[in-house]
Image: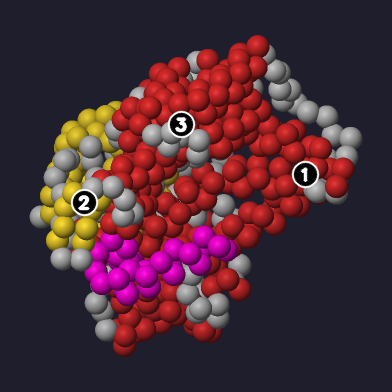
């Protein structure tokens, strides 16, 4: 399912003295099946833009196409619920959305709202709880008895249970320990690869964007300003810093290596392995071996 | 959620904004009493005039006012209709079956509606031009004498400022949770009433959970920083009474006098 934004503008509290402009002429298309990262510093409008992907916010200017469904500024939108079935959003700190008596019921909430039968919803919950890395016993517990990290996983399972075509992730790992972060990001990446889930990652972690995304869109002051593959984007660190973003640590490390070597390496490296190989080429071969 | 004007503060730099919050509070309370003196066309016109004058003085847009009245519009119409149909004085104007409208009823209905509107508008001027913190400070100082009879004035003021402080936070939180549940297919705005009431549960449970958690965190943070109540506490924000504040109260007394003179 493609998502296309055409000259989208958005203001919060439009028409009141508290009106606050958040987006200006945002224009981009996210193709079905890609892993798209949207990055930008705090207040760049990335969280606002993601709420347009399933009609939670309606543009005050321009239009949004979600598959065959079109939301135009100023027109009343119908059947938004249908769209929401296809585009799942994992909000920042999604554990705040848990409310049911048991984890099982909470995961089933989404599917039941979209008319999935009780049996199917329960089957999905049982399947997903292991996918997100929790034991099945958890299903019978109250979500409020779980740890923060476990609650996060339950909430993610609750969104995945809707079987969306597109999943939007807003800082899905904020506040987790490094190991939990990696586990969750790897799980989404596997889902993306195996199920062909279109994944939109909204983040300010350049590391995650560099590691997982096929394509990166940079937001700055409510506009999309730059787009390209991670390699292209991170090759130009100066431009990136102009948008108040720091390149990933691995790229910064490469910058330091290049400074010491006195000349640049062949390509921009996005992972430790790539960088190690690149650097090795420039090291003098040990004699006698 | 963005449309609720009542209780919001619009920063500004007008005569009304600069007034001491204590003066504004006293003025509004005085005004509420004085409004009840009005009972004929002249006195009600004076009240409307004063309200419009304050609006101009505070540079509040009329559109803003109409928005502010929206939440109470139902109550306004309800009281109007009640008086219209149940006050039986003066000449009969209109009759249809058991429904009878008398001249006195129409008059009374309009008066009460104006009285109600003027009260709501004047109090919303107070909150529109005064920051919630300033209002709380003013209340604490004005109630200070009650400490003599063991009323916990400082604690009450603290409770008030804490709740005021967390209104926007809870609003944001509500908005966030609402969106998260809507993204999971929960439907708050369509369908039969029964389903809509059910759809509130997924909203309220997380909201309460986070409100309690926040309260606990705040209590811990206050204790950690050695908070022990109002005893011997000095103030960061000092209130200053100027001649304009005295003038406002003089105007209020003059208004009372004028209304008393012209009332029927």
Mark in the foreground, 2 or 1: 2
Residue A151, label in figure? none
Which residue: 33% across, 27% down? B62
Task: Locate residue B67 relative to residue B166 in the image: left or right.
Answer: left
Residue A289, percent from left and from top: 54, 44
Residue B92, label in figure? 2
Q: Nearer the viewer, residue A176 or A142?
A: A142
Which residue: 55% across, 62% down? B208
Chain letter of the residue carrying label 3: B
In terms of sequence position, does the residue under pointer 3 or pointer 2 come before the other? 2
Q: Residues within 10 Å of mark 1 (few under 14, many from 20)?
A: some
Q: CA distance from mark 2 to mark 1?
A: 54 Å
Q: Are marks 1 and 3 on the same chain?
A: yes
Q: CA distance from mark 1 to mark 3?
A: 38 Å
> Quarter of the image holding residue B177?
bottom left
Which residue: 70% across, 57% down? B216
Residue B153, label in figure? 1
Residue stretch rendered in magenta on the structure: B184-209
Residue A70, percent from left and from top: 13, 49
Task: Locate residue A137 relative to residue B47 in the image: left or right.
Answer: right
| Rendered-image quadrant of the C terminus of chain B | top left
SS for dot 2 = strand
Residue occupying the far right of the picture: B232
Task: Locate residue A45 relative to residue B233 in the image: left or right.
Answer: left
Q: Are marks 3 and 2 in contact (CB under 8 Å)?
A: no
Residue occupying the far top of the picture: B243
> Quarter of the image holding residue A220?
top left
Residue B263, label in figure? 3
Residue occupying the far front of the picture: B91
On the question of residue A213 being in view, the answer is no
């Amino acid at each position: 399912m493609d998502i296309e934004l055409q000259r989208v503008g958005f203001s919060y509290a439009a028409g009141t003295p508290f009106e606050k402009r958040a987006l200006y002429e945002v224009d981009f298309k996210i193709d079905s099946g890609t892993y798209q990262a949207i990055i930008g510093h705090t207040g760049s409008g990335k969280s606002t833009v993601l709420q347009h992907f399933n009609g939670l916010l309606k543009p005050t200017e321009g239009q949004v196409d979600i598959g065959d469904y079109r939301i135009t500024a100023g027109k009343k939108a119908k059947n938004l619920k249908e769209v929401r079935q296809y585009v799942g959003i994992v909000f920042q700190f999604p554990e705040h959305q848990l409310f049911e008596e048991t984890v099982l019921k909470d995961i089933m909430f989404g599917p039941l709202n979209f008319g999935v039968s009780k049996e199917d919803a329960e089957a999905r919950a049982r399947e997903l709880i292991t996918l997100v890395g929790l034991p099945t016993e958890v299903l019978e517990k109250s979500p409020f008895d779980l740890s923060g990290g476990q609650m996060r996983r339950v909430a993610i399972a609750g969104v995945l249970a809707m079987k969306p075509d597109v999943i939007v992730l807003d800082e899905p790992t904020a506040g987790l320990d490094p190991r939990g972060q990696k586990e969750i990001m790897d799980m989404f990446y596997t889902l993306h690869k195996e199920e062909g889930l279109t994944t939109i990652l909204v983040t300010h972690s350049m590391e995650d964007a560099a590691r997982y995304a096929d394509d990166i869109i940079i937001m700055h002051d409510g506009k999309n300003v730059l787009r390209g593959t991670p390699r292209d984007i991170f090759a130009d660190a100066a431009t990136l810093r102009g948008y108040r973003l720091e390149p990933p640590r691995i790229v910064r490390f490469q910058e330091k290596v290049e400074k010491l070597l006195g000349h640049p390496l062949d390509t921009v490296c996005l992972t430790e392995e790539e960088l190690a190989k690149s650097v090795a080429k420039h090291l003098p071969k040990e004699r006698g071996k | 959620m963005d449309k609720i004007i009542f209780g919001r503060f619009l920063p500004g730099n007008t005569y009304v904004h600069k007034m001491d919050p204590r003066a504004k509070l006293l003025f509004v309370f005085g005004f509420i009493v004085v409004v009840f003196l009005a009972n004929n066309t002249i006195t009600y016109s004076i009240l409307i005039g004063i309200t419009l004058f304050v609006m101009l003085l505070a540079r509040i847009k009329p559109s803003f006012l109409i928005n502010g009245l929206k939440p109470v519009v139902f109550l306004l119409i309800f009281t109007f209709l009640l008086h219209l149909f149940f006050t039986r004085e003066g000449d009969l104007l209109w009759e249809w079956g058991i429904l009878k409208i008398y001249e006195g009823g129409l008059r009374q209905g309009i008066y009460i509606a104006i009285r109600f509107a003027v009260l709501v508008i004047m109090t919303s001027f107070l909150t529109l031009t005064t920051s919630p913190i300033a209002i709380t400070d003013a209340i604490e100082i004005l109630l200070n004498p009650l400490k003599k009879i063991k009323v916990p004035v400082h604690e009450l003021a603290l409770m008030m400022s804490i709740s005021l402080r967390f209104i926007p936070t809870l609003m944001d939180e509500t908005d966030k949770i609402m969106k998260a549940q809507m993204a999971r297919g929960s439907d708050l705005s369509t369908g039969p009433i029964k389903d809509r009431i059910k759809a509130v549960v997924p909203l309220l449970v997380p909201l309460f959970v986070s409100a309690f958690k926040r309260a606990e965190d705040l209590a811990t943070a206050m204790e950690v920083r050695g908070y022990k109540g109002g005893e011997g506490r000095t103030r960061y924000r000092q209130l200053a009474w100027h001649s304009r504040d005295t003038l406002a109260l003089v105007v209020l007394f003059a208004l009372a006098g004028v209304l008393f003179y012209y009332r029927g």
